[in-house]
Amino acid sequence: MRSSAVFRLLLTAYYLLPVCAGCASLASSRDLYVIAAPVEHLRATPGTQPRSGAHDPDQETQLLYGERARLLKTQGAFAYVEAVEQLEWTHANRWQGYPGWLPFVSLQPLASSPPPTAVVTTKWATVWTDRNATRAGLQLPMGSRLSAISTDGPLWPVRLLSPTGEYHGASGWISSGDVTLLRDLRRLRVADRRQAVLAAAHALLGDPYFWGGRSPFSPSRPERVTGVDCSGLVNLSYRAAGLEIPRDAHEQYLRARRVTTPKPADLIFLSDPHQPQRISHVLLYLGQGWVIEGPGTGLAVHRIEVASRLGRPIDDLQAGQQVEGRTVTFGAYLP
C-alpha cells in the first residue's frame, strides 16, 4: 500500500508547513498522543473518509485503539500526525512513522493515558461498562492495546480511553479470552510466538482487501470501512502477537532478516515488476507449502498453496528467483 514516491514527498513537505493563519503549527512540540477510538483512518488530506473498500489513494493506513501518534500540527478539527508505531523509510533516508491526517477528537494525550499491558488477540472484543457484562461499551479490534488493572477471573478490569470523555479515566471489563498480556507474549517460546502470528492471520481469512487497511473486518460497523491490505495483514498479525514490524511491504523487507528457507510466520516478498529494487507485495508463510495473503482490491484474504500462487512448490522456490517478472525473497522477524 503506497502513494507514488513523488506525490508522497511533495505532500509531506506541504503539510509540514503552516496551512493557514488559523492553523496551529505543532511540528516542534513533539507531543505524543494515543488513539482513543477503536479504529481511525490516517488520510493524505484532512476532512475526508473512505466510503467503501474500493481503492482510495488518499487512504494511508489505519491506527488502532491505544496506538501512539505524534501530533505535528492541527487544521480546524483535524490533526496531522506521525504514526510512530508504523515505521516507513522516508525520502530523507531515515525511519519515521507514517504521516497523515485524522480527526483531532480521536487523540488523547499520552501523559494522561495509562501504559498498555495487554493486546486484543481476537478479531473484535467487547469492553463492558459493568462487571456483570450486561452493558456493552467499546468494541475493540485485534491489535488494540489497553491497560489491565487486574488479571484475576474471567473478566479483567481495564482502564478506558475515549475521545468523547465518556469513558476516559473509567474502568471497563473485558473477557480474559479476548486479550493477552504483552509480557506473556514476550515469554513465549519462538515456536509458540510463530503460532500466535498465524492464529491472528487465520482470524482474518475471508476479510475484504482494503487498500491502506490494517483492521479486522466488522460487518456490524458499516459506517467504518475495515479490512486489510497485504502488508496490513502481516503487520496486524504480528502486532496481535506482541511484535512490532514496519507497516508496508517494502519496509517489512528492509527490516527483515534474509533467510533461504522460510518457516511458519516468515514472509515471502515479491518485487514490483516495473521496479525490481522495490518490494510491492508480501505473503505470510504458513508452513507445508501454504500462504495467507491479502491479494488485492475486490478480493478477500485467502489461504492458497505456494505452488498455485507462484507456479512452483515452496521446495523448488529459491530466494532471488524470478516468478512472472517478480523477484522472490524470504524474510524473517523471529529466530
Image (cartoon, grey):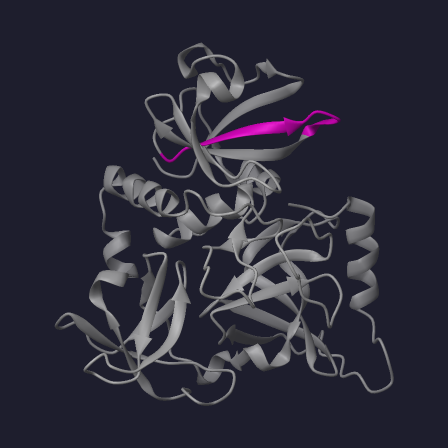
Callout count: 0
Whether residue 192 is visible here, answered yes or no, is yes
Whether residue 245 is visible here, answered yes or no, is no
Residue at the spot 57% in from the left edge and 17% down from the top edge: 320
Measured from the top left, where is residue 173 in percent x and y?
26, 77
Measured from the top left, where is residue 203 in percent x and y?
36, 47
Name the image quarter holding residue 33: bottom right
Measured from the top left, where is residue 78 in percent x and y?
69, 77
User: Is the N terminus in the top left, top right, bottom left or bottom right quadrant?
Assistant: top right
Residue at the spot 56% in from the left edge and 77% down from the top edge: 106
User: Is the C terminus in the top left, top right, bottom left or bottom right quadrant?
Assistant: top left
**Is residue 329 left or right of 240 when viewed as pictured?**
right
**Is residue 199 left or right of 35 when viewed as pictured?**
left
Residue at the spot 32% in from the left edge and 75% down from the top edge: 127
Question: What range is drawn magenta here?
Answer: 265-277
Nearest the eye: 169 or 58 = 58
Q: Is residue 284 above or below residue 185?
A: above
Nearest the eye: 95 or 121 = 121
Q: Residue furthest left?
A: 153
Q: Is residue 138 above or below residue 55?
A: below
Q: Is residue 294 above or below residue 11?
A: above
Q: Residue furthest top?
A: 316
Measured from the top left, where is residue 232 in percent x and y?
52, 48
Residue at the spot 45% in from the left edge and 59% down from the top edge: 218
Examine the residues drawn in magenta and state their main secondary structure: strand
Query: Is residue 324 covered in magenta?
Result: no
